[in-house]
Image (spheres, rainbow, N blue to C red):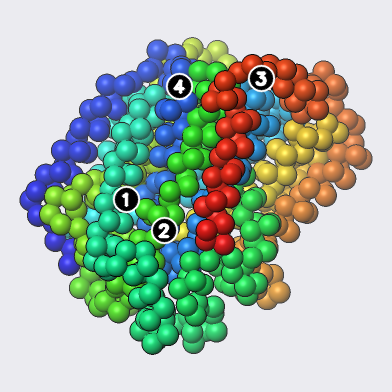
Amino acid sequence: MNELSYIDITVIVVYLIGIIIYGISKSKRGSSEDYFLGGRTMTWPIVGIALFSANISSSTLVGLASDAYQTNINVYNYEWYAVVVLIFFAIFFLPFYLRSGVYTMPEFLERRYDKRSRYYFSFITVVGNILVDTAAGLYVGKIVLTLLFPSMDSTLILVILAVAAAAYTIPGGLNSVIQTEVIQAILLIIGSCLLTYFAFDQLGGGWSGMMAKLDTMLSAGDVNFGNRLDEGKYIPANADEVFSLVRPSNDEFMPWWGLLTGVPLLGFYFWANNQFMVQRVLGAKDLNHGRWGALFAGFLKLPVIFIMVVPGVLALLLFSTLDITSLNYTLTDGTICNNLSDCPNLTYPVLLFQLLPVGVLGLVVAGLMAAMMSSVSATFNSASTLVTMDFVKQLKPELTSKQLVRVGQITTVILVVLAISWVPFIESVSDSLWTYLQLVIAYTCPPAVSTFVLGLFWKRANGNGSIVSLLTGFSLAVFMILSQTFDWIPVINELHFLAKATWLFVICVILHMIVSLMTRAQSEEQIKEYTYKKEMFKEESKELIGLPWYKNYRILSVILLVITALVVGFFW
């Protein structure tokens, strides 16, 4: 099932060597701004593709297919909501980020609040980059390469993957990362389109044939849902339910109320507060290119349902009864997995091995490796930027620009080791990668989102309210994790993770407001450049008069919202 031909291996090796050489050739390291922000010269197509590529990582590819197999297309709610969040980000937050000239999101919090908020958020972000983004990307690479080369030591595989990604990140900085992301995004899209084509070709009958076969198999009970039925979990009754974005309130993965509460919070943190993503927009040559790039990234998210989510549903039709014991994949309980329902993380690799012909398989596996390298290199760069600019530079302000670049390179090496060390933990806690990613973000994002939102839209918010809210939110998140782990408080443990994220956000907002009102307000001089005023919208409206529609970000935002509504409406 999982054998590669020499042609496939050649394609993969040539690609990996080529992308490393290309990345190094695009190095920009003359100054700290060149190294960490690419010299702030990125145009909108580069910004948009880089955002898309950094987001649609290997963990996303495997995670979307895995969740589509388990939960069907409602996992796409995370994707289309990203469009809404990116529009909101481009209109309100991005202007403040770019005009302030900051290198990092924690640095912006210091400008708005104080150093306490900066140091705390920087530390949490670095930890998140390593424990979530980088380690998850390496984990996916390990899954695929272990299946392809079962005789290779898993630790050696991790080292190879991490070193390959770091090979151009360490010498080249953000410019190398983004330039390679553009190439890798193109390959990723081509590979995903090819996989979707071959999946439909195997099934036969196109879209209507897929829906008819799905109805037939569901009514006959020929789809293996594993233990979900025995556990009383939601199971779709027909094809329309499989392809519905809205699920009942008792759905274990994403109930309908989660679309109004938890999902927007997770999306806002990921796209508007996360250094890993925002750093790409900070490298834009100006505000217009930053805005256009963010909107372009949103546009690229819309086809994801067809080329990355639907293949997971097709796997449900094609391979739900396939015996995959030969893959020798070990579950967290120590048993060998024999069907996709018990190890959905293998959905994407199984699709590759079962459907793709020689040569094409090598190309698509190279695309998967491209996505892994893209996300891992991006997190290496963003995390090293945080450590260098938020900690080292603050402790050693006398360091020259070139010395800061060297610190960033050394930091990246350390982060590589830490990320490799964390991968075994991911394997031990969850057989569903996407669940792991969303759980971690759900617990960590609410304090950050409340701090950024209140900071921009409520001028009375101050540093005391910020740090108390951040620390309390973190403490509550840790308590919830411990309660879940050791079964302390059932009523908390039984809450859906999207509900937990919502309650954490509400608590953080209330606490932030109470503490801010009870303590001294910050001066108008300190906050005027970092809080939104209605007058700004009016002034900007005057500047937009006379611009062609394709340069007016507001018109482009409306067009993007209409297209999004049409796509979402089709699957509602």
Q: Nearer the viewer, mark 3 or mark 1?
A: 3
Residue visible at 49% across and 34% down in the picture: 296
Picture disc at residue 309: 2
- Looking at the rendered structure, the kind of residue marked 4 is Met
Instruction: Pick the quarter of the image with the N terminus.
Output: bottom left
Picture quarter with the C terminus: bottom right
Residue 462 shown left or right of residue 80 in the figure? right
Relative to 401, 456 lies left or right: right
As measured in the structure, the alpha-carbon distance from the residue carrying label 1 to the one carrying label 4 is: 26 Å
Q: Which residue is mark 1?
A: 192
Q: Could you tell me how far apart the alpha carbons at marks 4 and 2 are, in whole angstroms?
A: 30 Å
Which is more toward the observer, 263 or 214? 214
Instruction: Tell me the residue that label 3 is attached to.
Output: 544
Q: Percent x, y for residue 378?
A: 42, 36
Distance from Cα at disc 4 to Cα at disc 3: 22 Å
The residue carrying mark 4 is: 42
- The answer to whether the residues at label 4 and label 3 have Cβ atoms under 8 Å apart is no
Q: Around disc 1, counting alpha carbons within 10 Å, would you say few (fewer than 14), some (14 to 19), or many (20 or more)?
A: many
Q: What amino acid type should be assigned to the residue bearing mark 1? A: Ser
Q: Quadrant of residue 219?
A: bottom left
- Mark 2 and mark 1: span between their CA atoms? 10 Å
| Position of 570 relative to 393 (above/below) | below
Percent coordinates x, y for residue 377 in the rendering: 38, 37
Report the Cα–Cα distance between label 3 and label 1. 38 Å
Label 2 sits on what residue type? Val
